[in-house]
Amino acid sequence: MAEVQSAVEQHSVVRDLTAFQQNILVILAEEPMYGLAIKSHLETYYGTEVNHGRLYPNLDDLVEMGLVEKSELDKRTNQYELTDDGHAALLDQFDWMFSKFVAGDGRAAELGDLIDANR
């Protein structure tokens, strides 16, 4: 439990992120991706087009905060990857959300079922 507390203390920056930025981190938790792949995942989630002018400045902000690493795949394509700090920040957010959601054994079981279904 000490590791989780340490992550909470060090990475509460995620609490100041927009929901859009948090969703980018969640998408990158699956695997490193290039910008258009991230855009596609976001469009599926939101059910509407995501503008390049919205996506890339937010990615740049996440890189600047040290939550995402940007690398060049080729001259025109960048790849984005969740950093260790980004991973810890997501854990912090999940910890906070779960602490509010789990109000009894029934809700804890619901979360367990969701986790089991997504393994």
Image (tube, rainbow, N blue to C red):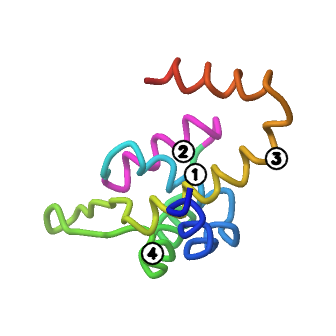
SS at badge 3: helix
Q: Number of callouts in the render?
A: 4
Do the residues bearing badges 3 and 4 touch, measured as CB atoms within 8 Å? no
Instruction: Look at label 1 and name its amino acid.
Output: Asn
What's the amino acid at mark 2?
Leu
* Residue that label 3 marks: 100
As shown in the figure, which amino acid type bears the numbered disc 3?
Lys
Q: Residues within 10 Å of mark 2 (few under 14, many from 20)?
A: some
Q: Is residue 107 above or below residue 86?
A: above
Circles 2 and 1 in contact, beta carbons < 8 Å: yes
Q: Quadrant of residue 21?
A: bottom right
Kindly check if marks 3 and 1 are in contact, taking CB atoms under 8 A apart as contact.
no
Q: Is residue 60 above or below residue 52?
A: below
Magenta residues span 34-48
Residues at marks 3 and 4, CA–CA distance in whole angstroms:
31 Å
Residue located 73% across and 48% down the image: 97
Mark pair 2, 1: CA separation: 8 Å
Q: Does residue 110 sit above or below 93 in this rendering?
A: above
Q: Does the magenta segment cover residue 63?
A: no
Mark nearer the viewer, 2 or 1: 1
